[in-house]
Amino acid sequence: MVDAQPVKELMRRALAEDVGDGDVTSLATVPAGTRAMATIIQKADGVVYGLQVAQDAFTALDGDVELEVLGPEGAWRVAPAPVMRATGDARALLAAERTALNLLQRLSGVATLTARCVRAIDGTGARILDTRKTTPGLRALEKAAVRAGGGVNHRAGLYDMVLIKENHATLAGGVGAAVAAARAAYPDLPLEVECRTPAEVDEALQAGAPRLLLDNMTPDELRAVAAHVAGRAELEASGGIVLHTLRAYAETGVDFISIGALTHSAPALDLSLILEAMP
């Protein structure tokens, strides 16, 4: 899980956005002091992630809520299956429901799509990477969900890795100059160079780049580059790769495949909350 304090602040803002001055429907229809038990059910096969986030939503509105985890995170589960249970003030449970489910469904969707991609390339030796194409404000959580699904995190942001792309190389005076400048400025950071053609691959290798991002190449092109590089640099494939073509790319000899869709297009995992009144 990620640092607790930013998550709690996110939860505070999310609840304020939804609840505002109060859940008028529950205030009007649910008698004060009513207690209830809420059970979250997984309705589609997949990987659940984000239980702590969901628990924080309920705790934020009812400090005395009783929470029980009913299923594991990071494991593929067949639906229907219980996920977690919250017992406490009925009004608070209803007010927290949508925020808890929105975040849990979103993060579980990311974990599930990642797990599907990891399964698709099993045995090839390649690994699935995420990207920076994340929901603003949710990057740390979405990248944690990728890990829960069996994927590997790429750079967290612009600050923890040098990734030289076409525009950087152009402004620096070429790939060689860009690599040299980056090495001089940030010698301890990982470094990668984007390459779109075999000529750019050779230029990056000559500059001493330890990792190459091979952008929008076909499987045949990737296979040829992998044979040419022959272990002199790590190779990452990216661009236009979808689930049903994933294995063909993974079998080319690349080390990584980065997929923006893990975080920008993952469908939410279907979850629901069932509420039962307590005597």
Image (cartoon, rainbow, N blue to C red):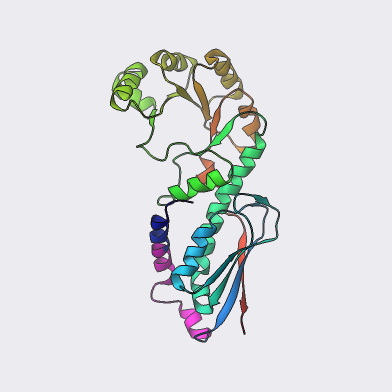
Give the quadrant of residue 80.
bottom right
Residue 14 coordinates in the image, percent (x, y): 42, 63
The chief SS type of the magenta part is helix
Residue 107 can be seen in this image:
yes
6 left or right of 131? left
**Residue found at x 60% / y 75%:** 37
Give the quadrant of residue 184.
top left
Residue 247 coordinates in the image, percent (x, y): 65, 31
Q: Which residues are magenta?
A: 12-30
User: Is residue 242 shown above or below 23?
Assistant: above
User: Is residue 191 shown above or below 32?
Assistant: above
- Taking the magenta stretch, the answer to whether it contains residue 15 is yes
Residue 148 coordinates in the image, percent (x, y): 56, 47
75 left or right of 154? right
- Taking the magenta stretch, the answer to whether it contains residue 2 is no
User: Is residue 213 shown above or below 260?
Assistant: above
Residue 170 can be seen in this image:
no
Number of numbered discs visible in the structure rendering: 0
**Residue found at x 38% / y 76%:** 21
